[in-house]
Amino acid sequence: MTGEPNTRLSDLFGMAGWSKGELARMVNRKAAAMGHSQLATDTSRVRRWIDMGESPRDPVPEVLAALFTERLGRVVTIEDLGFGRRGRTGKRRVAGKDEHPDDVPWAPERTAAVLTEFTGMDLMLNRRGLVSAGVALAAGPTLTSALNDWLHSDPTPAADAPRTDTPLHADPAGFDRYDTAPIGSAEVTALENAVDIFRKWDAQRGGGLQRKAVVGQLNEVGGLLAYRHPADLQQRLWGVAANLAVLAGWMSHDVGLEPTAQKYFVIAAHAAREGGDRPRAGEALSRAARQMVHLGRPDEALDLMKLAHSGAGEEALPRTRAMLHTIDAWAYASMGRGQAMRRSLGEAEELFVSDRNDEEAPSWMQMFDEADLYGMQALAFRTLADHEPSAAALAQQHAKKALGMRNDGRQRSKLFDFISLASACFIAGDPEQGNTYARRAMVSMGETSSHRTWDRLQQMYELTAPYTDDPAIRDLREELALVMPRQAKKEKGAEA
């Protein structure tokens, strides 16, 4: 007991709208349903948790996390409640006070447990896509400060951590929670192939339809990681976990679950580092940076990108480094820093061309091809055009090149290219061409389930305002105004 209020628990308790007595009764009922019938929580104990910073004994933190997850419609972990975990290394956490958000970084031996808990909570939600108003993203500088030293050091388990050199050993937490068992090379290969399938689904249709499937698969992989396999298999499993976590994060971002997406990106960075793949860890953090740019926080994105560049290390292939520079460029463009944007795009082009394919790119980089390079250039110049209208012409050129190279399996990328192209045409004063490409975007958007699409379409819609005297543009605006609310309403109806 700290004697000070647990502000995290207090804030969540306020959002949930329960009385202390109600929470005590629900804890007892939920615990009984989870197999802990001996629990007898009362109002005074709840008061001590909230007002005095008392940390309840197991299994109460897990029960509380489940209750708040169901109530608030988004994942709530034990760390979110302001409680520490037994067996942690380092200084004991003080309830309600944080050195780093969500205990980032966590001890190496905790990664699989954090992964399985978070995915389990995510799967428990009875509503998809609902994020409570009180949920906030961790700021870019906060994450980079927390992760910087950690990312540049080797994973070092605590002295009292479970031994990892005994094959087929399972952590105690793995029992009673998972039906998984140790697996062999063929099963790991099957999991790696499944990741490729999920990745193609995401690229073709967006994150809305397959997100739960990816989260479920990631949860199962977390169960497998509770066992200690031979070193080569363990490393490959960590790679599968990192790839699935990035996909879960990207799909969550795609449907507007922003805090959940950020958590998955951080989990992915941890998993990649556990597997010794620093370039993958850097790429995972770059996803969090792209998320920040999309949300209008480019300065924080640049903080994350500095860590992504340094964390990826010298092992990163030229193509990987090229991709990282395109994200830098988009962030600079959002800030109106045209010179810095052009410099970053120039570096990206040089690195991309220098990649002679002497070494096969990892599976997670194979989606970044020449079409993607042009697509990111189009997005950067189109974004800069909000500050420098003359950049719209270059945005059109790059978008057309990207579209000419897209294959049929990249439907969402095509859609974004059409939106970038149409928007650039409106900025450049060419409403006729803008109308043509906007309508092609509208034809394609029904084939994807991406909330980011609606954000970009809204921006494009606003760019049509100067051309309302044109009957064709008036028709376009009316169709957009009708279609977008209907789609949003349909999405909300599916979530309820």
Image: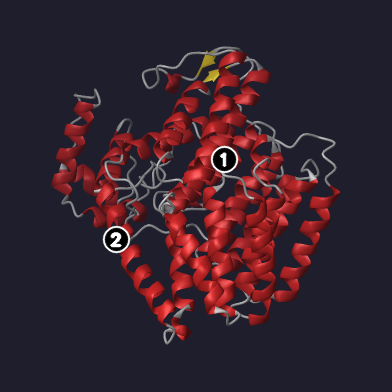
Residue density around tag 2, few if under 14, some if 14–19, many if 20 or more, within 10 Å:
few
* Marking on residue 486: 2
Q: Specify the quadrant of the image occupied by residue 216.
A: top left
Residue 365 image point, x, y percent? 68, 42
- Picture residue at 59% right of the left edge, 39% below the top: 270
Between 439 and 6, the one nearer to me in the picture: 439
Q: Give the number of callouts.
A: 2
- Report if residue 290 is visible in the image: yes
Label 2 or label 1, whichever lies nearer to me, is 2
Q: Residue type at mark 1? A: Ala
Q: Is residue 26 left or right of residue 192?
A: left
Q: Secondary structure at mark 1?
A: helix
Q: Is residue 308 left or right of residue 227?
A: right
Residue carrying label 1: 268
Q: Quadrant of the N terminus?
A: top left
Residue 7 image point, x, y percent? 35, 56
Q: Secondary structure at mark 2?
A: helix
